[in-house]
Each structure stands twice: as C-alpha cells, then as structure tokens.
Amino acid sequence: VIKMRAEVKRVKVLLIRKLVRQISVLEKKKGSEADLEKLREEIHELKNVAPDSVTKAALQKDINFEKVCRNKEASLSKRAIARIATHPQFSKKIQSLKAAIRAFKEERINAVKPGKQAKNESENATLQDQSQADRDNDDVGSEKSDDKDDDEKLKEDEGDKKTNEDRQEEIDVSSQESQKMSLETRNEQTNQCQKEESVTVEVSGF
C-alpha cells in the first residue's frame, strides 16, 4: 500500500489533466454549467482523496466505474476512487498485487499443513507410547497380583497342613491316652483276678 502511493499520485495527475481537457471542450461547446461544475468538483475531490484509501478499496473489491457513475447516490469521493482504481495503468498493478497476495496465502497454507501433520504424528506417537506404558503397567500389576495370590495360596496350604498336623497330633494323643486307659483297666482286672484266686486258695486250705 505504501509503495502504491506514488502510483496513485501519478494517476491522479493524469486524470486531472484529462478532466481539465474535458472542461475546456465543454466550455468551447458551451456545455451546461451543471456539467462543468460537476467536473470541477471531481477534480477537487481527486486532489484531496487519500492514496491509501484508493489502494485498499481497489485491493478489497473489484470496482466498476460505470456502475459507480450510474449510481445517483454515489458520493464524489467514491467517484474519484473509482476513476483512479479503474485507470488502466493503476488497475494492472493492482492485479499484480492481488496475484502476489494469493500466491503468498497459498504458500503459507501449504507451509502450515506439513507442520500440522508433523504435530499430529508426534501427538499420535506420544499417545501410542503412553498406551504401551499403560499396558506394561497393567502387565506388571497382573504379575504382582498373581504372585500375591500364589503367596496367599501357599500360606493357606501351609496353614491347612499345620492344622492337619495339629489334628493328627490330637488324634495320636487321644489314641495313646485311650490305650493307656485300656492297659490300666486290664491291669486292674488282672490284679483283681489274682486277689480272688488267692482268696480261693486260702479258703481251700482250711
């Protein structure tokens, strides 16, 4: 826009000279005073219009001078901008600028896509690594759980074994006591029989 300021001023001079010639022709042909006044006002507006506003308007949209002139509500400023924007030399440079802007946008978009793709690939790789780490943690946790279950089962087996041994000891003790009581009972019976035989012998002696 800044570089186009000089071009806008140059085109202004060309247009003003053209309008001055038209005024001279109308004056020679004794044209209406309204037409002459209108051309003088456009010359005045061309001198005052800001170069940057002309360039920005030309870049933002395609301007058709005939449509602007046919619009009765169009201001002198819009007419002046349309005159400059549609001048052949100025319009050619504006088209070159538009093409350069389009090329810049396309290049920028194409440059962003690979970066975005690389970012997505990096994020996917990170997610895969995290998922693998989670699976490894689950496997370790499962192994620990299995080890814990084995330890608990071993403890239970040892407890059962100990309980069985205690029960066996109780059975053995009970059996020994029962045998001891049976032996004592037989001894008592034997002693009783001996006593009875002794008594019998003594009675027979008498």
Image (tube, rainbow, N blue to C red):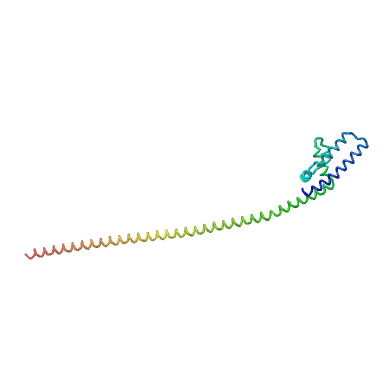
Q: In the image, what residue occupies the spot 35% across and 61% down?
A: 162
Relative to 177, does residue 104 appear above or below in the rendering?
A: above
Q: In the image, what residue occupies the spot 77% across and 48% down?
A: 2
Where's residue 97, x and y in %?
78, 50
Residue situated furthest right in the rendering: 28
Q: Is residue 167 left or right of residue 15?
A: left
The image quadrant of residue 122 is bottom right
Q: In the image, what residue occupies the spot 82% across and 46% down?
A: 9
- 27 or 35, which lies in front? 27
Relative to 97, does residue 198 appear above or below in the rendering?
A: below
- 129 or 84, which lies in front? 84
Where's residue 25, x and y in %?
92, 39
- 186 or 67, which lies in front? 67
- 125 or 45, which lies in front? 45
Q: In the image, what residue occupies the spot 74% across and 52% down?
A: 104
Where's residue 137, x and y in %?
52, 58
Q: Quadrant of the C terminus?
A: bottom left
The image quadrant of residue 194 is bottom left
